[in-house]
Image (cartoon, helix red, strand yellow):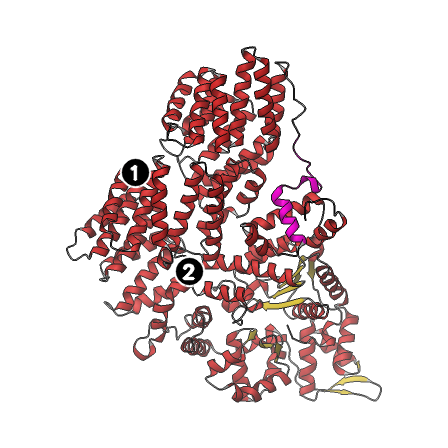
Amino acid sequence: MSNPVRGCALIGRGDELSRLVGWVDAAAAGRGRAVLVEGEPGIGKSTLLRAACAAAERRGCQAFWGAGDELGQALPLLPLLECLRIHRSTVDGERTEIIRLLRGELAADSADLTAAAGERLVGLVDDLCAAAPTVLAIDDLQWADPATLAVWGRLTRSARQLPLLLIGATRPVPRRDDVAALRRSVEADGLLRLGPLSEQAVRRLLTELTGGTPGDGLRRLADGAAGNPLYLTELVDALARGNGVAVADSGVVEVAEVPVPDSLPAAIADRLGFLTPSTRDAVRAAALLGVEFSVADLAIVLRRRIADLVAALDEACAAGVLTEATDGLAFRHPLIRAALYGQLPAAVRAAWHRDAARALAEAGASVDRVARQLLPALDGPDADALTARGEHGWALRWLVDAAPVLAAQAPKVAVEFLRRAVASAPAGSEGREVLLCRLADALYRVGEHDAAERVAADALGQVAELDRVVDLHCTLMQCRAMAGRARESLVALDKELARENLTARARARLTVLAARTHWHLGEVARAGEVATAALAEDTDRWTTAWALHVLTIVAMVRGEMPAALPMFERALAVSQDDPALTDLRLLLQINHAVTLGELDRPAEALTAARQVRRSAERTGSVVRLAQAQSALGQLLLDTGRWDDAIAEVDVLADESKDPTVACCDHGVAALICFHRGEPADARRHLAAAAPYAEQLGGRVIGQLAVARSADLEHEGTPVEALAVLRAALRNRTGVEDLLADAVRLAVLVGDRATARAATRRAEALGGAAAAPHRRAASRYCRGLLDDDPATLLLAADAYREAGRPLPRAAALEAAAVGFADAGDRGSARAAFTGALDLFASLGAAWDVSRLQARFRGYGIRRGPRVKHRQARSGWESLTPTEATVAGLVVLGLSNPQIAARLYLSPRTVATHVSHVLAKLGLHSRIDIAREATARPGTGRVS
């Protein structure tokens, strides 16, 4: 960045500047952190931020500066997009990708573009830090939108392991909970509260500004500034412009009797009053664009050539109103911009914003830049920008084209625009039909499901174009399913399907919606029949792909996994490279990965899950990303890679997950913690899952049910533990993985009826054509019920074939008990040792301890081949994935680069790096490299 700081502006701030520069030096050495500078307007926050950025650049660091904007709060991520120069880049690959994402060119049809762009921005900062130490400064955080603050919070957490210094500046008011949370996230010594300048500092500043010793009159005037350096500067400059100061021969500065500004706004107004009218008009127009602005945008808004603006801009810079910035110009202080903006009457301001929006739209500016100008135009007396027709209806025409991107990027803004536009669009016009569909979709996206349903239902009587009719029914189906009223959707769809003028395409699509509705109602067989009927129409890719999706989930529920595979292959082929099917394709890929896991093809399943996770990240579908991440965590649990499973399910915040995913993830984590002998951590996961489970009502999430049962078993209450599973088994689907534990507990407590019923269900699933783990579960249940250790050994062999170490260990333990009870100590010891080896390799400390205690009663103890779980600190404690990540950190790769190489998520990589730092007792990525260099024989990071 380039924005010079006047030397006198830092008077009295030496301690604060010294601390900031020290943190810059630390970041340059690889030890990053976050800092928050707080103080009233004009107290010196902006000056400190710019000085720190300048110091960073002198030290070879990259420095980026941006600011929150009170007028732009409704549009997500603007401070960060401007800070990181996203819209100003045409050659940088990552920045170009972010631009394309925000335009909707890469996104899934249900994508949250804001969340997706936030992920990309975090990745961009990671890459910047890999290239060079980086300073990121955002002024006026009190005006930042929630998405910006959320990304800033993530960067605050990751800064500790990167060469990254984050500097935020905020006013004490307005008070916001999310800003307060940021304040709490900053380490205690990283909060700089700027107070008034001391009396000595005030005198020094006055001396620098006037060139002499301040006399009594000047000091009395300065007292009214209450130690505010900007006010003092503006006061002295105002006196100088009015010839109100003079330096006596003694060097004392005397003050003449001239009008003096009595407030900071008045002092700024005095400065602006000396501008020529043409320059004042230019800077007022610039005030519409933000604290920093592009000269090209200013020329567009004023409808003038850049060459014609040079004189006015030069005058504004010379007058101390504007200054140079990295990619354009900036107001010397945000308060100067605010004063200019406030001088305009509300009606004039709204009109200027409307005209600016139109000029930018006609110039092909991005949707967010146009919307940023159009929003304030809606609040003034001239708020008809979206309701005018004819020649003045440009905004209406712009919105018809911009609505899809705006609804995904800023759905609340889209709702505001669309509501006004729909109210005035000509009845029966094509534009009105489009706007109605977009409004219903935008309302659904922001969670106003009742309003979305009303708009969609009313629109059905007004919309003629059949594809839009299908879109409206799709919105209605989703809204009513969310409200538990899916049956109403079937009634509406049956009525629509009875129309005589339906095209084959519309009929097939509506039939697919009916099939999906039957599925929502739990009518599995009927859903399959209706989907098959829709598929027979074979009218277009949309119908074919959705019909196949319904048929795949019907097959999955019925346990017909092999039959589902060819349908997945066909659906994925049909949906490829079709933007309208991007979200469905992600869902198909997730289910495909789950199906491969169910078929005990773990390598293929893990590859498929990682690929769909990367696709979900790229397209911005937060819902699908969470589902893919959850599927991956489940696969890693099943295959015994527990450290990696924990890393995956903990990556995303619960707020970004649907209730089912949140429950599953916490269930996976809790189950691992119970087996590891970490019940406190496990119960924290169960508590975190509780509110999401409540939202699901009686729906059973298998891993959560098993974890709740394990909790009660840890408490020594196996009867209650069984009761949890028995209640879950009342469901006919989704409970297959509960059967083995149910039989084990039922046999333990003597509930033979439950054991027999669960065994029958397991055997029904575990026929000769079933996947190995289903056959294994069938044998395990039968072996427990019949107390047959030979059958249990067969179950252990089948679990080994399936690649599932935990249930294999359980089968070997049960076989060992059977052999020991029968007096076959040799067979008992072999099975016991095999079980103990497996539990130990998993890090299942609770199972190891429990098993050893149990077999001491048989006089059988741990053999010499059994190893304890690996060390908990030092290089030897790193898991294989952590060791690989550490090695790539040593090579200088950023988190996104490591993620691309290992098919991980950047968030997962960050989690692994955090684990590495904690286990090695280090603080930053550079520390890892130094430690590795000092330990060349570790072999871990080669």
Residue sitting nearer the eye, 835 or 740: 835
Hey, what amino acid is under mark 2?
A: Ala
Residue sitting nearer the eye, 814 or 478: 814
Residue found at the far top of this picture: 823
Q: Position of residue 477 (x, y in %)?
A: 30, 49
Q: Which residue is mark 2?
A: 408
Q: Which mark is residue 215?
A: none
Q: Give above or below for 353 relative to 72.
A: below
Residue found at the far right of this picture: 250
Quarter occupied by residue 109:
bottom left
Residue found at the far left of this picture: 500
Q: Which residue is mark 1?
A: 524
Q: Secondary structure at mark 2?
A: helix
| Between discs 1 and 2, the one toward the N terminus | 2
Mark 1 and mark 2 in contact? Answer it, CB < 8 Å.
no
- Residue segment shown in magenta: 868-890
Q: Is residue 167 visible?
A: no
Q: Position of residue 510 (x, y in %)?
A: 25, 51
Q: Residues within 10 Å of mark 2 (few under 14, many from 20)?
A: many
Residue sitting nearer the eye, 324 or 237: 324
Q: Residue at x 17, y 51 (%)?
A: 498
Q: Position of residue 435 (x, y in %)?
A: 32, 64
Hey, what amino acid is under mark 1?
A: Val
Q: Residues within 10 Å of mark 1 (few under 14, many from 20)?
A: many
Quarter occupied by residue 399:
bottom left
**In 3D space, how far apart are the residues under numbered discs 1 and 2 (Cα atoms)?**
32 Å
Left or right for 492, reference 374: left
Q: Give above or below for 27 relative to 596.
A: below
Q: Is residue 82 magenta?
A: no
Quarter occupied by residue 431:
bottom left
Does the magenta stretch mainly form a helix, a strand or a loop? helix
